[in-house]
Image (cartoon, rainbow, N blue to C red):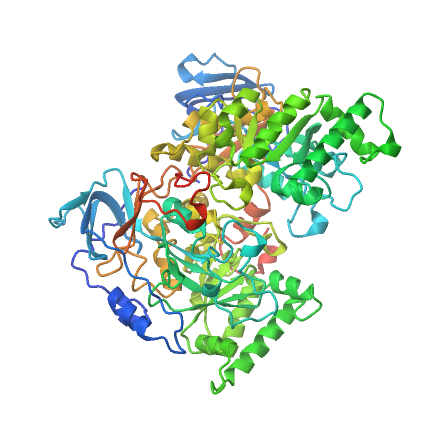
């Protein structure tokens, strides 16, 4: 427990007070702003009324009417991590289908599916991810019945009943091998399904939709109407270089589409074309196996090479076992810099790829970054946040200090010892 | 780099075969000739693995983790004729060797060993035609051998070598079955045949699985077992039938089960829940065999005392949890709590990606323990991915630590192996340099990847 912070700031007696925004000033720590810049060794951060007021060198910190939080010298401060894409809040146990709301293959509806009412703010996965430093996430369902997976939402991971911040923020469509299997057995079927849906959605958006002549349900056409008119972003999952080129072509065909590319395991082969298109990428990191014919050229240098070509990039949380591996994956990209022939990211770029970049790509311009006016999402770490030995010691969302306990921490405390001499373990709580 | 307090100088130390059932196999040459001769019923498909040419090499100065809990700065490692000759510390005199590798700022460990892999049996690309890991047609298939499914061209082997420093691995059949068959222990050296990868002298393992998988797969087919009690009923009856096997009419399944009962084949039991592991331990006592290791074992922390008393290892992930009901109580402190209870910890992957980062998984498990007040030295943590898996696979007399006379299975890391920022720079197997991050031709490319986009890339 040597790493526990000594808390001197007011109103930090967490257990006794309701969750309310707290004013925090911390100085003499390493500050990483999340904007791509390198960390500041002797830095300071100030949060007031739920917003960032200052983040920078400690010696330029403005005078603040509050007591400083005292922290050990190896403490780091970063913005909250932003996880895109996740299924947080949509399931309790993956293999227990009754507890799993990620997809709905037997529903007559597809694009109209909306994760908002299904998200459970009390989910253990939200609590555990919060303890891992994630403060905001894009929650998106999976494709099962059609290439359109439905509408995802942006949540915060605060310990309250109000998780969804932006409902229906994203539609998702799946191309490539997965899309081909869903849409009838071939990529040819995928592209007909996609174009037909776009044309029907355009008709719906223009008030010319004829249900009798349509393949989409009315609800699906209405949902896609927002996509075709550019009012809702479209996540397009594709890995093979030729599929990525089709995504770029789709944007030329339907210019109003607000496309974000997802996955892009062969993105490095078409990096300059992606950069020229202006389409941002939520890219899989560390995928280096030809685990499908979609990704024969997969390499851990994919993100580094795309970044070097000027592609706007975030690391995809969906391509890892748990969203809280984001920091570990980012750290691995830093490590690649030491391997001749490999392409990685600088430390600052790697942190940005799990903070400000995903935030910007999903439309949260004031999250994932420590700059005046940004949301007061703050993580205080017991060491370098991208290092596997480090962990958050405090997490704030909108300036509200969050509890970090959960099912796992309770089990840890119960089984700290195996002593049952007085009573069974069931009485130890 | 963590503080290295224990200075263990192995110079001149006697080579002790700790608890080893295969003493004669300590020499690779002896083993190769012995197994080649043994093309009888006891050992068909013998190993044809032969070490590749090696050059006498001294790595100095370098931080050493010996895999047995020893670790020191300013040390050196001397390899010759495919073997570790000697490892030394700052006060011992290194030999005069022509080829010297500068290990300044770097760390040397034994080759990393994954006790739980499906490489080759579920290779990349993961298409249905490659799905060779589960003979899911009967709840007990002790007759199948994982080596007959291994595709040596799986690109996953090369990634495990280059990114993970993996020099040996156990390929297990999958967990659909209560008794899944024999495992294959391989050296991570590319070969045209699986025999060319088989670890000479390694005993067979036997894969068992309890819990959700067997009852789901066979319950789904409307047959026994469909419950956990069904799992035990089928297991116990199968053991009882095997005990009366006299060997007159050959029965492949019963030959394997007899090998387990005779202590020649080591049991690796996929099992998640604490209560279920305790039942398996009792069943093993009833039937007269021993469980060498529980794999996955996400609830081992609840029964560390029981596992210590019964000398059973736990092969675990650092922090996987929640993907199935029996994984719901998985916690990141599992490995540290098992270690703290005095039981044996192995970090495993069960994953073609995870096998590339076993060092990071071990580091995460260590850090979770430290945060709850369990401080496990770095050198001890390295044994979770070197000596401990070797011991649980029955090959610890030959590999798994940097001790004189052992195979020169060695990784030179370009930094602290317990840091996210470090990767293998060089990997030797039996003293042969088989991966070198500084030399793009010292990087294996499988047949499958030739002529494909990205051939020979850093990956």
Vertical position of residue A390 compared to residue B176: above or below? above
Vertical position of residue B78 compared to residue B45: above or below? above
Indicate the position of residue B451 as horizontal and vertical percent values.
Answer: 43, 42
Viewer-side residue, B124 vs A338: B124
The count of marks equals 0
Q: If the image is split into quadrants, where does the C terminus of chain B sit?
A: top left
**Residue A417 can be seen, yes or no:** yes
| Quarter holding residue A235 | top right
Viewer-side residue, A143 vs A216: A216
Q: Residue furthest toward the right?
A: A212
Indicate the position of residue A384 as horizontal and vertical percent values.
Answer: 42, 32
B333 with respect to A229 (left or right): left
Vertical position of residue B440 compared to residue B198: above or below? above
Indicate the position of residue B264 as horizontal and vertical percent values.
Answer: 40, 74
Q: Residue at x 38, y 37 (%)?
A: B421
| Quarter holding residue A205 | top right
B323 with respect to B399 (left or right): right
Vertical position of residue A222 compared to residue B95: above or below? above
Q: If the image is split into quadrants, where does the N terminus of chain B sit?
A: top left
Indicate the position of residue B257 as horizontal and vertical percent values.
Answer: 49, 76
Q: Residue at x 32, y 62 (%)?
A: B49
């Amino acid at each position: 427990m040597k790493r526990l912070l000594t808390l001197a700031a007011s109103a930090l007696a967490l257990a006794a007070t309701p969750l309310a925004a707290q004013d925090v000033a911390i100085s003499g720590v390493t500050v990483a702003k999340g904007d791509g810049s390198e960390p500041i060794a002797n830095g300071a951060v100030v949060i007031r009324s739920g917003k960032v007021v200052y983040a920078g060198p400690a010696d330029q910190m403005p005078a603040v009417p509050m007591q400083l939080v005292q922290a050990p010298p190896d403490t780091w401060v970063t913005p909250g991590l932003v996880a895109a894409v996740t299924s947080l809040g949509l399931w309790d146990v993956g293999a227990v289908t009754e507890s799993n709301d990620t997809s709905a293959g037997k529903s007559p509806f597809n694009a109209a599916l909306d994760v908002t009412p299904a998200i459970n703010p009390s989910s253990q996965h939200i609590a555990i991810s919060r303890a891992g430093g994630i403060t905001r996430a894009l929650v998106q369902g999976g494709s099962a019945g059609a290439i359109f997976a439905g509408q995802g939402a942006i949540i915060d991971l605060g310990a309250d009943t109000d998780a969804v911040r932006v409902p229906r923020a994203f539609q998702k469509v799946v191309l490539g091998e997965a899309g081909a299997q869903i849409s009838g057995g071939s990529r040819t079927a995928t592209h007909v399904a996609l174009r037909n849906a776009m044309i029907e959605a355009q008709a719906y958006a223009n008030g010319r939709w004829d249900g009798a002549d349509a393949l989409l349900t009315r609800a699906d056409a209405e949902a896609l109407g927002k996509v075709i008119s550019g009012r809702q972003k479209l996540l397009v999952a594709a890995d093979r270089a030729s599929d990525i080129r089709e995504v770029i072509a789709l944007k030329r065909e339907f210019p109003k589409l607000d496309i974000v590319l997802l996955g892009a395991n062969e993105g490095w082969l078409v990096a300059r074309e992606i950069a020229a298109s202006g389409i941002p990428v939520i890219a899989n990191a560390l995928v280096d196996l030809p685990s499908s014919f979609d990704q024969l050229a997969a390499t851990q240098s994919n993100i580094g090479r795309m970044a070097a070509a000027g592609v706007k990039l975030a690391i995809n949380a969906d391509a890892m076992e748990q969203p809280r591996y984001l920091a570990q994956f980012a750290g691995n990209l830093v490590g690649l810099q030491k391997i001749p022939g490999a392409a990685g990211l600088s430390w600052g770029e790697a942190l940005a790829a799990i903070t400000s970049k995903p935030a910007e790509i999903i439309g949260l311009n004031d999250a994932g970054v420590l700059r005046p006016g940004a949301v007061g999402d703050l993580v205080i770490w017991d060491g370098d946040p991208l290092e596997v030995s480090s962990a958050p010691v405090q997490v704030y969302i909108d300036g509200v200090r969050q509890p970090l306990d959960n099912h796992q921490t309770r089990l840890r405390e119960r089984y700290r010892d195996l002593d049952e001499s007085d009573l069974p373990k069931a009485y130890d709580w | 780099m963590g503080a290295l307090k224990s200075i263990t100088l192995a110079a001149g130390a006697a080579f002790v075969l700790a608890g080893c059932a295969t003493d004669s196999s300590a020499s690779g040459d002896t083993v190769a000739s012995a197994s080649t001769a043994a093309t009888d019923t006891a050992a068909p498909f013998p190993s044809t693995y032969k070490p590749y040419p090696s050059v006498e090499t001294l790595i100095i100065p370098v931080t050493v983790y010996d895999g047995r809990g020893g670790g020191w700065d300013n040390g050196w490692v001397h390899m010759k004729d495919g073997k570790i000759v000697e490892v030394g510390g700052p006060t011992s005199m290194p030999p005069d060797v022509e080829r010297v590798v500068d290990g300044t700022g770097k760390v040397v460990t034994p080759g990393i060993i994954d006790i739980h892999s499906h490489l080759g049996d579920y290779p990349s690309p993961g298409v249905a035609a490659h799905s060779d890991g589960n003979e899911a047609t009967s709840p007990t298939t002790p007759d199948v051998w994982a080596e007959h499914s291994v595709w040596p061209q799986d690109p996953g082997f090369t990634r495990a070598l280059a990114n993970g420093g993996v020099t040996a691995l156990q390929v297990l059949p999958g967990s659909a079955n209560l008794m899944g068959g024999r495992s294959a222990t391989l050296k991570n050296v590319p070969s045209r045949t699986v025999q060319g990868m088989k670890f000479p002298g390694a005993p067979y393992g036997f894969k068992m699985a309890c819990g959700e998988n067997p009852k789901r797969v066979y319950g789904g087919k409307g047959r026994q077992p469909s419950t956990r009690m069904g799992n035990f009923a089928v297991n116990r009856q199968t053991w009882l039938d095997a005990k009366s096997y006299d060997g007159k009419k050959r029965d492949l399944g019963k030959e394997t089960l007899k090998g387990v009962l005779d202590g020649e084949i080591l049991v690796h039991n996929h099992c998640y829940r604490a209560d279920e592991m305790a039942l398996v331990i009792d069943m093993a006592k009833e039937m007269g065999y021993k469980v060498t290791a529980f794999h996955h074992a996400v609830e081992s922390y609840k029964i560390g005392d029981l596992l210590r008393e019964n000398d059973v290892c736990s092969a675990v992930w650092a922090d996987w949890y929640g993907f199935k009901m029996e994984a719901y109580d998985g916690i990141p402190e599992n490995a540290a709590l098992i270690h703290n209870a005095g039981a044996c910890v192995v970090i495993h992957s069960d994953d073609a990606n995870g096998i590339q980062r076993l060092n990071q998984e071990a580091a995460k498990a260590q850090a979770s323990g430290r945060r709850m007040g369990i401080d496990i030295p770095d050198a001890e943590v390295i044994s979770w991915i070197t000596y401990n898996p070797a011991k649980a696979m029955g090959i610890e007399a030959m590999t798994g630590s940097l001790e004189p006379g052992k195979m020169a299975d060695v990784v030179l890391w370009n930094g602290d192996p317990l840091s996210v920022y470090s990767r293998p720079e060089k990997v030797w197997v039996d003293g042969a340099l088989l991966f070198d991050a500084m030399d793009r031709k010292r990087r294996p490319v499988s047949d499958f990847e030739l002529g494909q986009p990205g051939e020979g890339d850093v990956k």
